[in-house]
Amino acid sequence: MKKLSVMLVEDNRDDNELAIRVLKKIGLRDITVARDGLEAINMLHGNINSGVEPTSQPDIILLDLRLPKIDGLDVLRRLLSDERTKDIKVFALTSSEDPRDIDVCNELGVIAFLSKPLKVDVALKLDLF
């Protein structure tokens, strides 16, 4: 089994803590957390203005769609427009059932929608390994 790295992009502390517990329970230990869309983009692409270098690219991103600073759908568009991040598997972690969100995410290549809070049985069904 390959050791996967995960970036969790989630602004809600409770959902964040629950997701981390679930990820650890299914054997994932290399977890990076971004608390808003801007922080995620800066971590993945770097920020020349503030001297922030990009971190190593995760294998998987769990992306909340409703984020402060930069919306999750915009984060997804930016990931796809950059050669460094366009091939990262992205899972939408959301409580949204808005059909427009689902349509846009499907068009942008989201692997799957995961309901919040993330649960172990759902995480185990994912094709992560």
Image (cartoon, grey):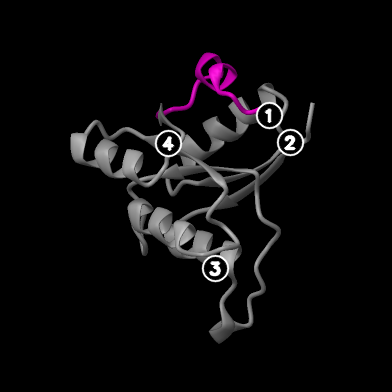
For the record, the magenta segment spans 115-129
Q: Nearer the viewer, residue 26 or 18?
A: 26
127 in the magenta segment: yes
- Determine the residue positioned at 59% across, 18% down: 124
The crowd level at tag 4 (other Cα within 10 Å; few <14, some 14-19, many 20+) is: many
Name the image quarter holding the C terminus. Answer: top right
Q: Is residue 43 left or right of residue 63?
A: right
Q: Are marks 2 and 1 in contact (CB under 8 Å)?
A: yes
The crowd level at tag 2 (other Cα within 10 Å; few <14, some 14-19, many 20+) is: some
Residue 125 place in picture, x, y as percent? 55, 16
- Determine the residue positioned at 46% across, 34% down: 111
Q: Are marks 4 and 1 in contact (CB under 8 Å)?
A: no
The quadrant holding residue 120 is: top right
List the residue tagged with mark 4: 93
Q: CA distance from mark 3 to mark 4?
A: 20 Å
Q: CA distance from mark 3 to mark 1?
A: 25 Å
Give the SS element for disc 4. strand
- Determine the residue positioned at 63% across, 29% down: 23
33 in the magenta segment: no
List the residue tagged with mark 1: 24
Q: CA distance from mark 2 to mark 4?
A: 18 Å
User: Disc 4 residue type?
Assistant: Leu
Q: CA distance from mark 4 to mark 1?
A: 16 Å
List the residue tagged with mark 3: 42
Q: CA distance from mark 2 to mark 3?
A: 22 Å
User: Disc 3 residue type?
Assistant: Asn
Q: Earlier in the sequence, mark 3 or mark 1?
A: 1
Q: Are marks 2 and 3 in contact (CB under 8 Å)?
A: no
Q: Are marks 3 and 1 in contact (CB under 8 Å)?
A: no
List the residue tagged with mark 2: 29
Q: Farthest residue toward the bottom? A: 49
